[in-house]
């Protein structure tokens, strides 16, 4: 309960009568345990009509005095109480500490005054940065550690630290919005839809990217918001538009990057109408930007459908030697005997994630000699790849590596990727053309599938 202002009304006969009646019913309460907060030096607990109140010693105003009310509203009242003559700042214990700035091998000692509010803010920041659960403040071990580290720190409960974190979020959000309002450059927006597996609820993340006045790339997560079903183009466009208006970016949008879902394609013209073509570059012709990493993912997934039968023996071999702890031990023993580097571990791929297939094949190639030795020793190992299978696996890995490297470059967050985009796309197109004439029927079929998907999204680049 926060008291934002004190309203002083003119005295009347009715008010005086009511005040006398309240004072007659007022009973001073002696708490069962010692009240630790220093604020109780300025208040006393009284019971009025069976309700616990905190009565100001200076102005006699009565505020909520139940335990669940806390003491923050009492401190706020003392700041604005017209009769309060207490010092603005209470005395705090001063101690010595080693300075964090150590120069020339010398350690500096400086005065240090403990501040409960600063410590609470640092605790909330720690929980956010390291993704700790809020319940960490209730853990017995953590509370003992904090008490040993700083006995003056009064550790709070999870609901309190949750409120602190939300308050910090509101402050930082307001600061970010004010900064974006003053920003004069165009801003690129990316959105990504995500469905929670355990909640089965859809969420949307909206991120703003821009180059600041120091020519440094900045990225701000504007919103991470629940999107009610159905996730139609109209719903997505309106939520995005509301976020742009809130952050003063309606007039500053340069591009909107989305993945290649049909709903996102339909969302673009709706958003153009909501913003207005006059506020967009070239009337909105440059607004829709397809996610390069997502397109590369679609291209490679189509390729893996063509290669499914050709890499099946490699997948079966990896599955065979990772199926039980005993087989894993046997595999590691043979690898050690053959002096094969075991820094990379065998792992079965997830068929819906092409990069996991690439990783599986590239690691399996490192253990080629181990698989060949185990084929001679283990009779039940009947799915061992042939020399042709290994050769084909090497050719596939060489081609998938190109996509893996470029996807990693496109996914960079610490540098601008706009200047890298066109040369890398051209590199992919030139390699696809070269692979179509390599003489291997399967690789040529793979390149045809790649080319078809490439032209579907990027044919205009080739002119």
Image (cartoon, grey):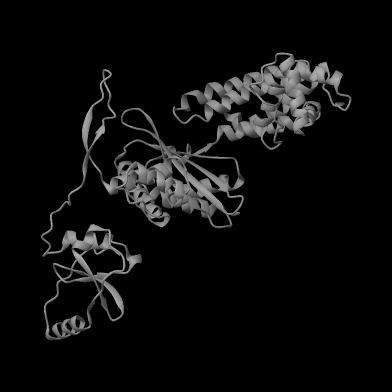
Drawn side of residue 220 relative to residue 6, left or right: right
Nearer the observer, 154 or 391: 154
Q: Nearer the viewer, residue 4 or 434?
A: 4
Q: Quadrant of the C terminus?
A: top right
- The residue lying furthest to the right in this view is 379
Instruction: Tell me which residue sits at (28%, 24%) in the image.
Output: 102
**Residue 52: image x %, image y %?**
29, 74
Query: Looking at the picture, how far across and down is residue 297, in whole percent?
Result: 63, 33
Residue appearing at x 13%, y 54% in the figure? 87
Q: Is residue 463 left or right of residue 135?
A: right
Outermost residue, top direction? 339
Residue 81, compared with residue 339, is above or below; it is below
Q: Position of residue 157 (x, y in %)?
A: 40, 55
Q: Does residue 274 appear in the picture of this structure? A: no
Numbered marks: total: 0
In the rendered structure, the answer to whether residue 119 lies left or right of residue 109 reads right
Q: Is residue 38 above or below residue 181?
A: below
| Residue depicted at x 66% and y 24% | 400
Q: Quadrant of residue 126?
A: top left
Q: Quadrant of the N terminus?
A: bottom left
Of the pair 153 and 125, the residue shown nearer to us:
153
The x and y percentages for residue 242 are 42, 52
The one of 59 and 244 positioned closer to us in this rendering = 59
Q: Is residue 411 visible?
A: yes
Could you tell me which residue is drawn at 75 percent across and 22 percent down?
443
């Amino acid at each position: 309960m926060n008291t934002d202002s004190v309203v002083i009304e003119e005295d009347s006969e009715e008010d005086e009568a009511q005040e006398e009646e309240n004072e007659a019913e007022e009973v001073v309460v002696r708490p069962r345990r010692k009240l630790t907060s220093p604020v109780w030096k300025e208040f006393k607990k009284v019971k009025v009509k069976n309700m616990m109140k905190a009565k100001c010693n200076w102005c006699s105003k009565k505020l909520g005095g139940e335990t669940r009310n806390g003491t923050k509203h009492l401190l706020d009242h003392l700041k604005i109480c017209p009769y309060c003559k207490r010092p603005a700042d209470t005395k705090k214990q001063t101690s010595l500490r080693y300075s964090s700035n150590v120069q020339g091998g010398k350690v500096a000692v400086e005065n240090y005054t403990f501040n409960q509010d600063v410590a609470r803010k640092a605790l909330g920041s720690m929980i956010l940065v390291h993704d700790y659960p809020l319940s960490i403040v209730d853990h017995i071990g953590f509370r003992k550690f904090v008490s040993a580290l700083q006995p003056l720190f009064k550790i709070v409960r999870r609901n309190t630290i949750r409120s602190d974190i939300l308050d910090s979020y509101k402050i930082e959000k307001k600061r970010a919005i004010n900064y974006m309002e003053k920003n004069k450059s165009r801003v690129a927006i990316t959105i990504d839809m995500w469905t929670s597996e355990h909640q089965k609820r859809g969420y949307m993340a909206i991120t703003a990217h821009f180059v600041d006045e120091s020519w440094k790339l900045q990225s701000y997560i504007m919103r991470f918001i629940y999107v009610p079903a159905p996730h139609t183009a109209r719903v997505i466009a309106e939520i995005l538009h509301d976020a742009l208006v809130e952050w003063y970016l309606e007039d500053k949008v340069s591009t909107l990057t989305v993945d290649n879902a049909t709903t996102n394609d339909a969302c673009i013209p709706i958003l153009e109408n909501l913003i207005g073509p006059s506020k967009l570059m070239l009337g909105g012709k440059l607004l829709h930007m397809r996610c390069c990493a997502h397109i590369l993912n679609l291209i490679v997934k189509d390729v893996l459908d063509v290669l499914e039968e050709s890499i099946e023996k490699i997948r079966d071999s990896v599955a065979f030697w990772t199926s039980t702890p005993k087989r894993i031990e046997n595999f590691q023993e043979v690898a050690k005997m053959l002096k094969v580097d075991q820094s990379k571990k065998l792992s079965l791929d997830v068929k819906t994630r092409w990069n996991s297939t690439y990783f599986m094949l590239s690691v399996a190639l490192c253990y080629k000699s181990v698989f060949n030795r185990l084929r001679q020793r283990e009779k039940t190992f009947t799915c061992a790849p042939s020399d042709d299978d290994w050769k084909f696996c090497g050719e596939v890995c060489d081609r998938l590596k190109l996509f893996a490297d470029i996807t990693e470059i496109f996914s960079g967050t610490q540098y601008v990727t706009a200047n890298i985009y066109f040369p890398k796309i051209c590199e992919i197109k030139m390699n696809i053309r070269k692979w179509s004439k390599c003489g291997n029927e399967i690789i040529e079929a793979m390149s045809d599938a790649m080319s078809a998907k490439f032209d579907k999204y990027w044919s205009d680049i080739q002119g």
